[in-house]
Image (cartoon, rainbow, N blue to C red):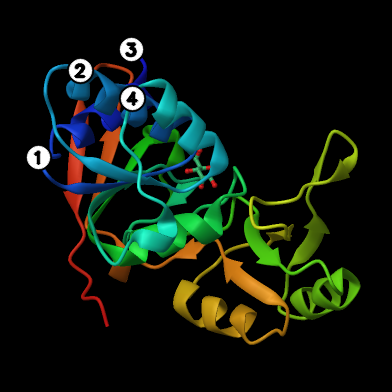
Amino acid sequence: MNAKKLAAEKAVEKIEDHMVVGLGTGSTASHAINKIGERIKQGLVIKAVATSVASEKLALEVNIPLLPLAAIESVDIAIDGADEVDARGNLIKGGGGALLREKIVAFASRRFIVVVDQSKLTDTLGSFPLPVEIVPFAPALALKQLRALGCEPSIRKKEGKEFVTDNGNLIIDCRFARIEDPASLDTAIKKIPGVVETGLFLNTMVSEVIVGYENGETVTRTITAARS
Ligand SMILES: O=C(CO)[C@H](O)[C@H](O)COP(=O)(O)O
């Protein structure tokens, strides 16, 4: 059984006619996009907004009508994957480098559904390096200031070159031993000039986490942390 696909398809069941739907990025979110495409073939009427160039391309391939991010004021439901989910529903995202647009869409969503397989669950965040998007102007200073927060930071590379996001920025992957207090860390990182966004998605923006298991089951966890 493909546990990521199971979780993604379960989330797609929640989409209703005339909703504005946020499309996440990554392999799990791609399963959701494909399933939405199937439902559109069967008559579902929605509009969607993509969180990356890659997701936009896939959505167009499966005939999902898209709105530009600039035209969006609110989103009814967003479905996206995660790199880590802690026991309280906090997330690390950005493994695919789409964290900025993903966070904009998640924050704008009335309902943000996270879809993962069991391997993404952890008690405390930190096993996955935390992605931080920075403007490309002064990476050495950003590395120094992130190191001072207690991590081992490195600029993300792809095929030997610096990875550049859809927004023209760089990603610094920060290896922390454990992230005990994601909210405080998020605040501290955002105080560094040049930081655009962090891959910490606090549980206050998460509505549900749907976990897929190899045995074919899915478990839905409702996250009740209030949005401030
Ligand atoms: O945050 C993300 C992309 O920026 C992805 O949601 C995250 O990396 C999970 O990816 P996958 O579903 O392929 O495991």
Q: Are marks 1 and 3 in contact (CB under 8 Å)?
A: no
123 sits to left or right of 172:
left
> Disc 2 or 3, which lies upstream in sequence?
3
Mark 4 touches mark 2? (CB < 8 Å) = yes
Residue for badge 2? 41
Which amino acid type corresponds to the residue marked 4 in the rendered image?
A: Asn
Q: Give the secondary structure at mark 2.
A: helix
Residue 192, percent across and down?
Answer: 70, 84
Q: Quote the CA–CA distance across marks 1 and 4.
A: 17 Å
Measuring 50% from the left and 31% from the top, which residue is drawn there? 57
Instruction: Say whether disc 1 or disc 3 marks the residue closer to the N-terminus.
Output: 3
* Disc nearer the start of the sequence (4/2): 2
Q: Amino acid at mark 1?
A: Glu
Q: From what the image shows, is residue 144 above or below residue 23?
A: below
Q: Is residue 203 visible?
A: no
Question: Is 202 rendered above or below residue 7?
Answer: below
Q: Which is nearer the N-term, disc 1 or disc 4?
A: 1
Which residue shows up at 80% across the image and 75% down it?
142
Dot 1: element:
loop
Question: Image height check: is 185 above or below 24?
Answer: below
The residue at which mark 3 appears reads as 1
State whether label 4 is within 8 Å of ligand 1.
no
Q: Is residue 142 visible?
A: yes
Reading the image, the residue beneath label 1 is 16
How much space separates mark 4 and mark 3, taking CA atoms?
26 Å
Mark 2 or mark 3, which is nearer to you? 2
